[in-house]
Image (tube, grey):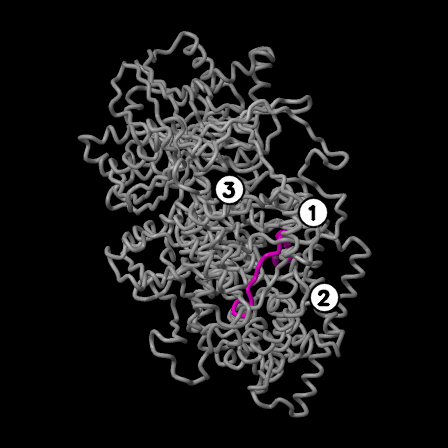
């Protein structure tokens, strides 16, 4: 009888996933009957340490040929083993065995590809599989082993725990029992016992079942073979639990199928008492336990949807699947609810909140209190809340004008929201200087909220000092709140504030009855009013503060890439305010015109919910989905884990407010909890948040300070700590009409709509608004022409507000994406838009690791050659649109632009469509690559406009930082009615008509002054000049290492009549110096002192000894080549860093025209910068 063996032989050229540049790969395989069937067989190999070319020689399957032929398809995945974090995906593939001939060995070399479930993961390499056919007749030794195993099964006595006797494993034994039996009955030595057991297992007489509760040499129970061979892993205590539960279900009359429910899956390995504390927090990261639970631990149990966990002695069932949460949040559920008595967290919160809405168990009293408080949280009440909220928000924002910057944005927002909530709840300004005790109340309330959680999870209540302070702060909170209650009760008895329009929340609680008994109304007592007032103050200020703080961090931390969201949000604000910085939003504005802002705030709370976990309880035995729960179980709903569940949310880590434009699955979005105990203050929190955020964005431009280092600070709520910001007042660009006035006619100043207008039709929106383009490059030099061309192209497209993919991205890095697009591509696939900048090196593609296109160029040309006569390949990239910019030197005529031309022709051969003809920069003839690309930008924009079907004349530039944060007064060229600024490029587009005819006119050179960047700021430091770094010279300060190297060769290799020089330099090495291939030579100028003094004359506030440094808030800054975060003297910068004798470029002259004071000088500079020819003539006339 023939058998077949499937072997995983080896892998080659796998991608590195570890920081060390290697991986620890292992393979998983699944055998299936056909492509879409369920897995019939699964196995996993061992991992190989630190090897990108591993050799496993692992027998993944061995069985009869007939059985193997039932498995036509094998699907496999390769993973990198990580000890601490989750394993990394390395690629996958599929093998079709239907063509395998029995008796004929065959190898399968399979290239790894990307999986739809792991998009964006870098994948490379291949795996070799081998199918072999061998004689399946059992050997003499195997026959003897099988006979011995059968005799062993008959003789082996059943000496097991009582639990195993009572369930289906009663005829079983442990490894320890087997060893003892073999030792005594058959006198087998210790050395032979293990071999004998293994041999018997290979005979398949016994079936292993995991049993973690046993402490024998092996943690496996062996069961006698039977028709039902395999059982799910289970622990003995779970078996006993199953029996007890089934018995209880039968005795209570519950349906018998309840006994078939599964037990809750076990969670990560846990320590005594501390439980899973080390999985959700570490000694270096104690403030993010629930955040770590949702982000790191829940995804590992996504398939199960829940797991068991112990945390500091408290046992929980952690749930993060909406289908399971549906049962927990079910109305009138007999199984689940909120039981605060005996719960460690709620017992601590009760110490200062009392029997408030959030700390009272389910029951009539909660329902009655909720009904009373809801009277103050209805839409009719919100109409009268809008005016006081606007008033107090405006007062708080006025303080920003005199506030020292940078300031802590979270602290400012907390103070503002506290003042608003104080007015709405008790009619008091909590920061009124006449009542200093109110401000102490805010600090005490913040402290007791944080400390109540510390007392549960860090046992700080055992520390006497902490316990005494907590008690003191709780007493202060009680005293102040009860004082407000007594004051309001006295006002009620004296007839004050008799009209509902004058009532605050505490007035509502005083005047509305809880219930009626014997015909008499029963009202809240003072203690109940105090508890609910404290609850409203605590939860009411924390949620808006957390929501707005995180939203500002996500939008203004430019490294997170959410600038497109910010621009859409600013556009909505401008449409509502008409550009009037004093505009106050109305009730209609908030609920009819702030749709996008609402979605942005909702998305913020999805990424970082104010409370990352919720607690519910099991009131009775019952079911949660397919799982069994028992009375007394604590259910911890991981809100963040639910929000990051990839089964519900596509790309859950991406900040995308458009998710909320469509209905959401039930119980998938839980920042306000859910079910009958959902937060009743959610609409008020959003109302306060929208008004405050709108006024803040309308009045100020916000920037994160370079000193800002944001970390998550978690107690009961999660806040960003270290959110340091600077703000600048914005100028008004229009005037809002008076209330009740007719809106301006369409197309005139003051026009607005509830939604951002679409591109085209005179919208004035940027061409790239909402469009995505991927820019790719290929170069060996990070500071060469390609990089300058790439940056200039990026700037031009960014000004039209295109969104970008990974930046920067080489062609080789993008190869897996384009390969996947070619496999799935065609005319019906999603379109890709690519911009490519490439160079050539002696006819070879760039091969530097950071900018290589060697693999991409080879793939494109090989596939293009195969596309001849193959219609499918010739259309495989029909959904790709692209343009190419090449950088080269025509002095190397044989290979000039060889690589860019090859990329262009290869993509066209595969069906990709070029938006424009390729553009080639010649370093031997053209002046500067920045000028060349700037000249090409109108042509590129025209091609993009045609591609999108947009009239270029209808498109305007994106708002710059000056447009949004300029001093008061209209800007030059501004219409005064909005922030879309009329620029010369737009005037030219409007003057040239439309369609193809305008393309020629747009090809002329238009150089605009570059907008100032907020990414870099200059600081003046109070530091002694002797303590800062310098660019060394022969006369460098003491302690600076300077090597005087001999200059052997300094030769110009360009033609004598060529304006620019390319120099060949040979420098001698000195002792103590080192050089590695790829090191770059930096040439610094030595400017004459007279030049330095002349420049300093224009800056009276600085001298040569002034210490400055440039700092940035971004990880990568373009168009800025001066040292960052390095203190230096002004004299050093001007003398040996900035080249004061450099030839000015056309862009430099355009920038200079925007800052000179004399109008005549401005006009002259604009004329010179108008064309490359003008610049050349001017340089010839003004050569020194």
**Which quarter of the picture shows residue 91?**
top left
Q: In the image, is 437 to the left or to the right of 597?
A: right
Q: Residue 337: x, y in percent?
A: 54, 61
Residue at label 3?
A: 300
Label 1: state its secondary structure: strand
What is the distance, in whole Å, between disc 2 and disc 3 at their CAs? 39 Å
* Residue 295 drawn at (x, y percent): 54, 47
Which of label 1 and label 3 is nearer to you? 1
Alpha carbon distance from label 1 to label 2: 44 Å
Please state the extent of the stretch shown in magenta in the rendering.
696-719
| Residue 326 seen from this side | no
Does residue 230 sit above or below 588 in this rendering?
above
- Crowdedness of circle 1 by 10 Å Cα count: few (<14), some, many (20+)? many
Marked residue nearer the N-terminal end (1 or 2) = 2
* Residue on which the image places disc 2: 443
Whole-percent x and y of residue 517? Answer: 58, 83
List the residue tagged with mark 1. 1129
* In-image side of 893 versus 973 (left or right): left
**Vertical arrangement, residue 905 with respect to residue 406, above or below:** above
């Amino acid at each position: 009888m023939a058998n077949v063996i499937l072997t995983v032989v080896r892998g080659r050229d796998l991608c590195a996933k570890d920081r060390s540049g290697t991986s620890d790969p292992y393979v998983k395989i699944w055998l299936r009957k056909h492509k879409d069937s369920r897995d019939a067989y699964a196995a996993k190999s061992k991992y190989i340490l630190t090897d990108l070319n591993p050799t496993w020689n692992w027998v993944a399957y061995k069985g009869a040929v007939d059985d193997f032929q039932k498995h036509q398809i094998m699907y496999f995945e390769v993973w990198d083993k990580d000890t601490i974090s989750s394993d990394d995906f390395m690629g996958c593939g599929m093998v079709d065995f239907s063509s395998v001939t029995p008796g004929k060995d065959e190898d399968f070399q399979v290239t790894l590809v990307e999986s739809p479930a792991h998009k964006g993961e870098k994948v490379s390499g291949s795996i070799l599989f081998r199918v072999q056919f061998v004689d399946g007749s059992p050997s003499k030794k195997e026959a003897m082993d099988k006979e011995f195993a059968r005799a062993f099964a008959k003789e082996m006595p059943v000496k097991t725990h009582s639990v195993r006797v009572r369930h289906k494993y009663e005829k079983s034994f442990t490894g320890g029992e087997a060893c003892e039996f073999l030792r005594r009955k058959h006198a087998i030595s210790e050395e032979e016992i293990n071999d004998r057991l293994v041999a018997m297992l290979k005979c398949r007489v016994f079936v292993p079942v995991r049993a973690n509760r046993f402490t024998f040499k092996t943690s496996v129970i062996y069961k006698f073979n039977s028709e039902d061979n395999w059982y799910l892993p289970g622990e003995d205590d779970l078996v006993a639990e199953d029996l007890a539960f089934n018995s209880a279900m039968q005795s209570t009359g519950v349906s018998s199928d309840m006994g078939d429910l599964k037990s809750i899956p076990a969670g990560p390995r846990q320590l005594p008492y501390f439980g899973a504390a080390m999985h959700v927090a570490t000694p270096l990261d104690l403030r993010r336990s629930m955040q770590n639970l949702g982000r790191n631990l829940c995804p590992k149990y996504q398939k199960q949807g829940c797991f068991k966990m112990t945390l500091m002695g408290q046992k929980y069932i952690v749930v993060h699947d909406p289908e399971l949460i549906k049962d927990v949040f079910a109305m009138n559920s007999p199984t689940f609810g909120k039981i605060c008595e005996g719960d460690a967290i709620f017992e601590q919160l009760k110490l200062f909140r009392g029997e408030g809405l959030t700390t009272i168990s389910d029951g009539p009293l909660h329902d009655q209190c909720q009904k009373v408080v809801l009277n103050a949280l209805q839409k009719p009440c919100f109409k009268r809340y809008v005016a006081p909220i606007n008033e107090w928000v405006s007062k708080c924002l006025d303080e920003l004008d005199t506030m020292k910057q940078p300031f802590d944005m979270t602290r400012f927002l907390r103070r503002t929201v506290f003042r608003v909530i104080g007015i709405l709840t008790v009619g008091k300004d909590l920061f009124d200087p006449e009542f200093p005790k109110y401000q102490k109340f805010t600090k005490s309330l913040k402290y007791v909220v944080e400390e109540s959680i510390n007392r549960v999870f860090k046992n700080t209540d055992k520390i006497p000092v902490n316990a005494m302070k907590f008690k003191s702060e709780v007493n202060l909170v009680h005293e102040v709140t009860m004082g407000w209650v007594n004051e309001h009760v006295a006002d009620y008895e004296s007839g004050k504030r008799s009209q509902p329009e004058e009532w605050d929340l505490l007035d509502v609680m005083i005047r509305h009855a809880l219930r009626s008994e014997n015909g008499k109304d029963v009202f809240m007592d003072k203690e109940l009013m105090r508890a609910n007032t404290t609850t409203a103050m605590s939860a009411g200020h924390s949620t808006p503060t957390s929501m707005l703080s995180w939203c500002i961090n996500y939008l203004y931390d430019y490294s997170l890439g959410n600038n497109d969201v910010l621009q859409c949000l600013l556009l909505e604000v401008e449409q509502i305010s008409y550009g009037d910085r004093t505009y106050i939003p109305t009730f209609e504005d908030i609920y009819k015109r702030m749709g996008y802002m609402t979605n942005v705030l909702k998305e913020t709370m999805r990424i970082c919910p104010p409370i990352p976990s919720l607690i519910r309880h099991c009131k009775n035995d019952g079911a949660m989905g397919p799982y069994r729960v028992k009375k007394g179980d604590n259910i911890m709903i991981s809100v963040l884990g639910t929000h990051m569940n990839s089964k519900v949310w596509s790309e859950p880590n991406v900040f995308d407010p458009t998710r909320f434009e469509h209905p959401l699955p039930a119980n998938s979005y839980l920042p306000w909890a859910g079910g009958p105990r959902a937060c009743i203050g959610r609409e008020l929190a959003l109302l306060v948040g929208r008004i405050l955020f709108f006024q803040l964005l309308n009045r100020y431009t916000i920037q994160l300070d370079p000193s800002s280092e944001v970390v998550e600070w978690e107690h009961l709520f999660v806040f960003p700590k270290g959110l340091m910001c600077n703000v600048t007042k914005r100028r008004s660009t229009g005037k809002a009409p008076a209330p009740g006035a007719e809106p301006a006619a369409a197309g005139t100043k003051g026009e607005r709509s509830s939604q951002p207008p679409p591109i085209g039709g005179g919208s004035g929106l940027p061409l790239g608004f909402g469009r995505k383009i991927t820019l790719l490059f290929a170069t060996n030099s990070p500071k060469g022409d390609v990089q300058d061309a790439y940056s200039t192209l990026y700037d031009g497209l960014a000004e039209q507000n295109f969104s970008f993919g990974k930046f920067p991205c080489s062609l080789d890095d993008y190869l897996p994406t384009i390969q996947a697009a070619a496999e799935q591509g065609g005319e019906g696939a999603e379109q890709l838009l690519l911009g490519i900048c490439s160079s050539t090196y002696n006819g070879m593609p760039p091969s530097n690791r950071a900018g290589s296109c060697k693999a991409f160029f080879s793939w494109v040309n090989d596939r293009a050659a195969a596309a001849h006569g193959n219609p499918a390949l010739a259309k495989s990239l029909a959904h790709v649109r692209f343009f190419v910019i090449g950088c080269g030197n025509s002095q190397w005529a044989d290979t000039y632009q060889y690589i860019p031309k090859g990329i262009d022709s290869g993509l066209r051969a595969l069906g990709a469509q070029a938006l424009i003809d390729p553009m080639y920069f010649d370093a031997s003839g053209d002046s500067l690559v920045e000028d060349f690309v700037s000249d090409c930008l109108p042509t590129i924009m025209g091609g993009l406009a045609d591609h999108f079907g947009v009239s270029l004349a209808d498109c305007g530039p994106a708002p710059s930082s000056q447009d949004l944060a300029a001093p008061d007064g209209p800007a030059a060229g501004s219409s005064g009615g909005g922030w879309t600024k009329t620029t010369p490029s737009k005037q030219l587009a409007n003057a040239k008509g439309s369609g193809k005819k305008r393309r020629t006119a747009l090809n002329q050179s238009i150089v605009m002054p570059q907008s100032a960047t907020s990414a870099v700021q200059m600081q003046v430091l109070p530091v002694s000049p002797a303590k800062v770094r310098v660019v060394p010279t022969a006369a460098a300060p003491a302690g600076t290492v300077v090597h005087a190297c001999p200059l052997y060769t300094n030769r110009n290799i360009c033609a004598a009549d060529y304006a620019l020089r390319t120099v060949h330099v040979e420098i001698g090495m000195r002792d103590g110096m080192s050089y590695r291939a790829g090191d770059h030579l930096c040439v610094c100028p030595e400017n004459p002192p007279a030049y330095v003094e002349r420049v300093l004359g224009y800056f009276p506030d600085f001298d040569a000894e002034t210490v400055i440094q440039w700092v940035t808030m971004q990880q990568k800054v373009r168009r800025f080549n001066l040292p960052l975060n390095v203190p230096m003297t002004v004299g050093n910068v001007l003398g040996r860093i900035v080249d004061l004798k450099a030839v000015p470029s056309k862009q430099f002259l355009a920038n200079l025209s925007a800052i000179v004071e004399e109008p005549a000088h401005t006009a002259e500079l604009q004329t010179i910068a108008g064309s490359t020819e003008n610049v050349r003539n001017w340089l010839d006339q003004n050569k020194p």
